[in-house]
Structures are given as C-alpha cells and as structure tokens.
Image: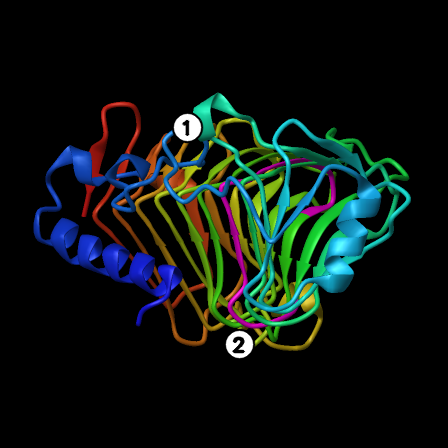
Amino acid sequence: MKTKFESLLLVIALAVVRTTAVATAAENFGHLANPTGDPVGGGAGYRDIFTKGDFTVTTVGELIDALKQARPSQVIYVADGATLDLTDAGALRLPAGVTLAGSRGRNGSAGALLISKHPGSMMFVTGGDRVRVTGLRFEGAYGGAERVSISSHFFGILHYACEVDNCEIYNFNLSGVSVGPGALKTSIHHNYMHHIQLGGYGYAVSNGGSDTRIIANRLDFGRHVIASNGSPGCGYEAAYNWVGPNATSHQFDMHGGRDRGDGTDIAGDWLHIHHNTFEGTVRHVVIRGVPSQRAEIHHNWFSGPAATKIVSGGNMKVYCNVYGPDKKLEP
C-alpha cells in the first residue's frame, strides 16, 4: 500500500506529464497548477487534520511525558487553543514513528501554538524514522534580518521518511526545517513559513540530504527560503510553492564547492524546480556551481525578466517558464 507521501509524489509526477504536453496554457505555470487537492500553505481546506490522539496535551509537562511514553504509530495531539512555551525545555526529541499533531485549518482554527525563545538550540529533533509534525504553529525567538546574538532554530530532521505538513513556522531567524544528509525521503509540504531571514543565514528549508521534496508551501520574509550546502549527494525537488516578494537575497539556492572550500565546483547532485510562483525583485534561483547530474527548471512563473532571474554554473536545463506580470513564455 502506498504511503500518503508516495501517493502525493505520484499525483505530482502525473501533473508534470500533463502540463508538459500543454505548455502554452497559462494556468499550468506557477503554484496555481497545484494538483495535490490541498491548498498551498495548508490551513483552511486542508483535508488531513487531526482532532484527537493517543495522548492529548495542554501543558509543557504533559508534552514531555507523552514524548517519553509514545510508541510508533501513536499520535500526540496538542489541544486546540493551547499555548506551550518550550523555551526552557531544550531540544525535544520526537520518537520514531510518532506524529505530533494539531488542528490547524479545522473550523477556522489557527492550531495550537508552541513557542521557544531559546537563543541557540533546536526546538525539536527527530529521534528515529517516520516522524511527522502536522497542524501546529511554531514561533521562534526573533523574526528580523538583523545580525543579533539570538540564533533560533526550529526542527532538525536526521532520519528516514519524515514529514512536516500543514504547519505555520515563523521567527526562527537562522533556520526552519533543517534536513540532514541521512534523512532520505523527507517531505515538507503545505506549510506557511515566514520571517526566517537572519543576515548570512535565514533558511526556511536547509537541505543537506539527497531526496527532499518541498511541495505546495507559502514562503515569504526569508533570505534564502530554500538552501542547500551542495555537497555530493544533495538534491531537492521544489514544486507548487508560492514564494513571496519579501526577500533579502535570492530565494532558491544550491551552494557550490567554492562556498565549502573543498576544491570542487560541485553544486549538489540534482535539482528539480517546477510550477513555483516567484514574486519580488531579487534573483529567484542561484546555483553556485555545477550539479553532478542536472538541474531542471520549468513551468515556473518568475516575476521579472528571464535574463536576471536564474544563475547557474552549468549542467542545467531551463525551459517552458513564464516571466513578468504578462507571463511571457520563454522557450
């Protein structure tokens, strides 16, 4: 039986085949082509919303106790309307196979709110494979772009087949979701991620893995809303995302060897960037080297002219994108 994530990838793959065949239709460009059945950014209209769990928590103590007791396939539900201040809790480890859930989007709910003002540690890290975080709001210590002493991180994914969906994630000035090199088959979809924009850092999604899917998110007030260190093995697909105009630097990023100082020009293994809407005046995609396999960029709507919006060191195929407010198609 296919998992939800595998079914989502099949829908997206079929949609890419269909849109490639009819590339002149304007509705097939940018995030509005979203085939997932759920709204870009999650929230109202999202279908897979929890209303209960094996554990229901309303306090920090109850959450910590539930994390100690929860077993694979169990759900820890943070009650709607609850606010949990995790500033003094340190980095909490989410056990293998456990879902941490809230009810964002149900009957107008914003979802329970989890806060951490800790000036350094992650709010959460994975403790095993197949962890899911869904339907919640997460607020970090600082949302500005200034270089301040506070370095706020949300979530470190270090394991296989983990998922973050239908969440609002903001004010983690250094990083939102950080994907480690062993975290294959990571899915980050239908989230609203904003005000993650520390000067020199500021990554809503930072990717060090080889198989990260970033689908149908709303991304704004970032520095690089998606970034990767570009080490051999890195790769990500970004599709059906709305990327807002409030950016302090280019929006999608893949570092090259000169950034790492490893004597190569390698900028990851692969990238697949399609059906995204990019707003704003900054460069939208910057690949700072040469991907070992290839980068493909197609069916996006870029707000500016073609000549200024994509930068790469090579081994890249760019086709069937539209540019500017009039959606001018460039071959």
The residue range painted magenta reads 158-175
Q: Nearer the viewer, residue 9 or 2?
A: 2
Q: What's the residue at 41%, 28% (across, down)?
A: 44
In the rendered image, which quarter is residue 213 located in?
bottom left
State the SS at label 1. Answer: loop
Query: Label 2 is placed on what type of residue?
Result: Gly
Q: Which residue is mark 1?
A: 44
- Give the distance between the C-alpha atoms of the residues marked 1 and 2, in whole angstroms: 36 Å
Q: Is residue 187 left or right of residue 83?
A: left
Q: Looking at the image, is 224 positioned above or below residue 112?
A: below
Q: Is residue 249 left or right of residue 18?
A: right
Q: What's the residue at 68%, 65% (across, down)?
A: 95
Q: Which residue is mark 2?
A: 233
Query: Label 1 is placed on what type of residue?
Result: Ala
Image position, residue 22 (x, y; %):
8, 47
Q: Is residue 45 left or right of residue 95?
A: left
Q: Looking at the image, is 227 positioned above or below residue 222?
A: below
Q: Earlier in the sequence, mark 1 or mark 2?
A: 1
Residue neighbourhood size for the residue with mark 1, other residues' Cα within 10 Å, grouped as few (<14), some (14–19), many (≥20): some
